[in-house]
Amino acid sequence: MTARGRVGRALALGLLLASCSEPAPLEGRVDLERLRSAEHEPGQWLALGGGFRAERFSRLAQIDADNAAELGFAWEYEARSRRGRVEHGQEATPIVVDGVLYVSGPWGSVFAVDAKTGAERWRYDPEVDGGYARHACCDVVNRGVAVWRGRVYVGTLDGFLVALDASTGRELWRTDTLIERGARAYTITGPPQVAKNVVVIGNSGAEFGVRGYVTAYDLESGAQAWRFFTVPGDPALGEPEHPEIAAALETWDRDSSWESGLGGTVWGEMVYDPELDRLYVGTGNGTPYPVWLRSPSGGDNLYLASILALDPDDGRLIWHYQTTPGESWDYTATQNLILAELPIGGVARKVILQAPKNGFFYVLDRETGELISARPFVPVSWASGIDASGRPVASATASYRNAPAIVFPTQAGAHNWQPMAFSPVTGLVYIPAREQGMVMANEPFWRFAPGELNLGSVAIYGASAERLPEPERTRLETRELLIAWDPVAQRERFRVPVGSEQYAGGGVLATAGNLVVQGTSAGRLALYRADTGTRLAEIEVGTAIMAAPVSYQIDGEQYVAVIAGLGGAVASVHPRESAAWRYENYGRILAWKLGGGPTPLPRPREIRAIPEPPVLPNLSAAGAARGERLFVRHCARCHGGRGESRLSSYPDLFGLPAQTHAAFDSIVRGGSLSSAGMASFADVVSEADAAAIQSYLVREQAELRAASASGAGRGSP
Ligand code: CA
């Protein structure tokens, strides 16, 4: 059925339903009343964060610190989200309602399975054109669905918001959420959030150059209710869309880089607060990164890297708090938001908690937006602290305008999208944290290039920092940690090292059984004591876990479940510690319970020999050198570079078989593998460019093959 046909049918159905009394939905029965009293139904997991406070805390205590070692495999469901030869990452948190588990996967696919057995109820494929993958900075991931009154809402990679029947997975409506479709590289990777009568969705794409906004739609009809832009548009092209944009304009240069869209995308989890009737939204980084290229005279650049409280009825701004004024380091504030009531100076206050990429832990009053406290939870160099007015005290050493600078933390974030959890029992927040520094350098000749990465800067950190000389190399080493943070005292209670490579630790779950549960990219599910951090058990899974686990109960048995699968920001270069180096990487939902068996491991990874490269008629050293530059610009972002660490979600271009070489131009420029996710690059890669890239690949392939034949190298992953 065409999209128009689907909408037409949905409208007709909507009219039909409106004319009779509305039948109670069979499945997916989540509403505000139920969400508000979620504490009385600890067996459910009704929203991404568990309940409306989004604490990611389960009040179940059957699995506890005494019996955690008896946790065993209950069931698995293979997500089968592979397209062509590419397996994409899994970043979503499941929602479990009345025995059914709903979770999204790559492209905005949705799986609904029996939460007791793993049997499939339905699956939904939004049938996104595979070529759209080119617009995604960090894989075609999706971070979750919203389940509400018999419907499942999900955003698709290509920018649609879709409502599905929770009982059948049938599409009820879909609406185009994008402005400038086709002209800008917008994607949706974040989850929708229901706020009273509307469902709200943001988008991604600030690395390419888009203008951030969130849009609210009527839950029933999908009709647009309001839209809030997070940054101004070019004032020469029209009046500000809403009063908050007029106010924000004062914080931007009149000669800002309007054509770049300016960024500020909303790609993380939002939260609706029914106690105060407002929606909290975290916004992302600027485009390009350096403020001096984006807004030459500087300025705070509202509402980049901010937490916003919006009125769900009309989208008006109630308050805002900007975590990083003049954001220049990709310091998003899209990280997960937790609502709590904390004793502050002896008074119980309604607060919102966030640990954004910039390394500070923030406690804000959620009635007023007033900053209560902020302290760094890892080494931070861009600011020396936060002053009494709530503004960070910027550090001159973090500017890379005139010379490269070492900055802590990195673009990967002191904390990224992997959700943190809060236990009201221990009073601690458990942060998947990262101690890491970077060398950041300016690109003074940057000009906006539509459809391409527009960073205006380069940064070296993580695996690429291994190239640096001492002592910088040691100084910039990555430490992945699980940090238990006391949000009242603003201090660390304990820390657990979880690895030395980026994104080693996944999202976190805390439980009333005195447990903290976290998966690792090494392919293990770890259980710790929530009060001390003592490791109680570690289950070998064989599949990297990035997403956050949840817990629920069916027929008297408590389960822990997670969706596993490596990709996302490390899709182009899988960390060496990751399970993908040892086992086949594919998406799987896994569930465990007490007394379960050993978890089945995936097949060991197959190491293929490097095939003989073809003999190209016009192979020249100059052509290969030019091809290398083009490869770095257009190909490496997904496929990864040549070298020992080149294992990637995408096909290895340094070991292509003969038939792929023969079809090289038709793939790169003709788009013949577009449906599998390899878009045509004909708009930016000429025939001669493609030939140069292939020359480079053939030269490297011959070298690698010779090295592996002599035993000096390894096979092609
Ligand atoms: Ca970013």
Image (cartoon, rainbow, N blue to C red):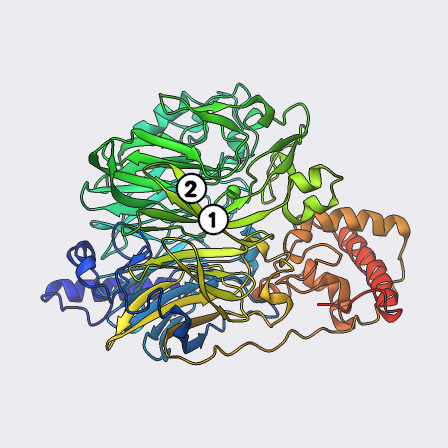
Residue drawn at 37 percent across, 58 percent down: 509
- Above or below, 305 against 529 in this view is above
Which residue: 71% across, 73% down?
607
Q: Which residue is mark 2?
A: 492
Nearer-the-camera pick, 379 or 215: 379
Which residue lies under the disc numbered 1? 495
Q: Quadrant of residue 696?
A: bottom right
Is there any visible trace of residue 521 in the rendered image?
yes
The image quadrant that residue 166 belongs to is bottom left
Assess disc 2: are there few (<14), some (14-19) or many (≥20) residues with their C-alpha within 10 Å of its C-alpha: some
- Kindly check if marks 2 and 1 are in contact, taking CB atoms under 8 A apart as contact: yes
Left/right of residue 630 with respect to residue 36 in the rendered view: right
Q: Position of residue 648 (x, y in %)?
A: 64, 61
Q: Residue 99 placed where, x, y %?
A: 27, 73
Which amino acid does the dot numbered 2 rest on? Glu
Residue 619, percent across and down? 89, 57
